Image: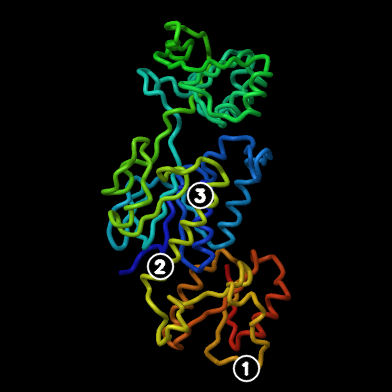
Amino acid sequence: MSTDWDVAVVGAGVAGLSAARVAAGAGLRVVAYDRMAPGGQLVNLTSVHDHPAPGETADSAGLVSRLVAEAQAAGVVMAFDEVTRVRSGTPVRLEAGAGAVTAQVVVVATGLGPGRLGLPGEEELVGRGISTCAGCDGPLFRGRAVAVVGDDEWTAEEALELAEVASAVTVLVPGEPRWDADRARRLAAAERVEVLPGVRVTALRGEGVLAAVVVETAGGPRELAVEGLFTYVGRRGPAGLVEEVPADAAGRLPAEGVGAAAGTVLVAGDARSGAVQSVAAAIVDGTAAGEAAVAARRAAAGPAPGGSASAAAPWLRVVDPTYGVPADEADGAVPEGGGADWTEVALFSNSKPNATELLRGVGDRLQEHWGLAELGFASKPNASAAADKDVIDWLAQRYKVVLVAVGD
């Protein structure tokens, strides 16, 4: 059955962009949906802590730009729309604001929703004192008292960032803090930060804007006069997004059983039940989901036409030095020209984002007519960039026929 996309990724955060890049790099038609802008939670942060290694800090905007650029260079199409429902079947059907589309494989990488306490009047105060982004809204509370609710490393970092602008920061920890010793030391050394463990927020005060919060402590209720409240608890996953797939208590989707319940639907990143919530983990998880999506498409496509088990291209294999030559070719076994068969064909595009449509439109027909088990592909990053001499030499040596696409 004809489908709009080979792979549709719901959510263009760290995990989603990683999954989309891997799938598109394998020659699949990939779209990545995001309701507003790519980057996920990173767009709400000024810096990413413990990345790329523990104790190190990375610029959030720079990391987002790199992930988006890599995905688009691989051929991923970015769609700014909200997917409201994923319906099981073959193919899988996605319902979005702009209309329904179909895909052979769907990767759910929505992450988690904003933190919520579940208290009366809370939603009315969002944007009027209640926030989930210190980097975004912290400057609005310069010289004012604020509170932060949470118990993890993210909570600690947000509190430390707020301490640079707020007059006082009270960290309300529902149980015991889970942040590391270094963050505990930094919080203790911050003059304007007070940490209150074992407290629970029970009520919000304010008419139109937040004025105070009521907390339950071991010594009884206590009212804190704060103009800002930053909540990092109660974040929920995409429960109900995928038809017939149950969610855990936090609304996250279990990776096991998703395939059986909803066709080829994968879950990656924070949306997955049991996921470790860190940038490094999201990259690893998204990469694995992208590889699983490629494997699923290969399994569904079957062996290459006329191919033996040894030829074994599950569908038209794409050999692409501009993205990474497959492992079996990285050992120097590339023919040095002169012995190529006439059925050895390559495509060259002047723009990597055009690659997937080129491969599907021309490549499939070449495979059908000539029984190709492999199709070479190379490209320039964009139309204005110069072609790499090594890539041109590689095409000339390995392939007898090179088809060139020069239009945008």
Residue 395's disc number:
none
The amino acid sitting under disc 3 is Ala
* Image quarter hosting the N terminus: bottom left
Which residue is label 1 attached to?
A: 339
Residue 238, picture quadrant: top left
Residue 84, picture quadrant: top left
Q: CA distance from mark 3 to mark 2?
A: 19 Å
Q: Position of residue 239 (x, y in %)?
A: 34, 41
Q: CA distance from mark 3 to mark 1?
A: 43 Å
Residue 15's disc number:
3
Label tally: 3
Task: Name the secondary structure under disc 3.
Answer: helix
> Looking at the image, which residue is at 45% across and 23% down?
126
Mark 3 or 2 closer to N-term? 3
Q: Is residue 77 above or below residue 240?
A: below
> Looking at the image, which residue is at 53% across and 21% down?
148
Task: Name the secondary structure under disc 1.
Answer: loop
Residue 297's disc number:
2
Q: CA distance from mark 2 to mark 1?
A: 32 Å
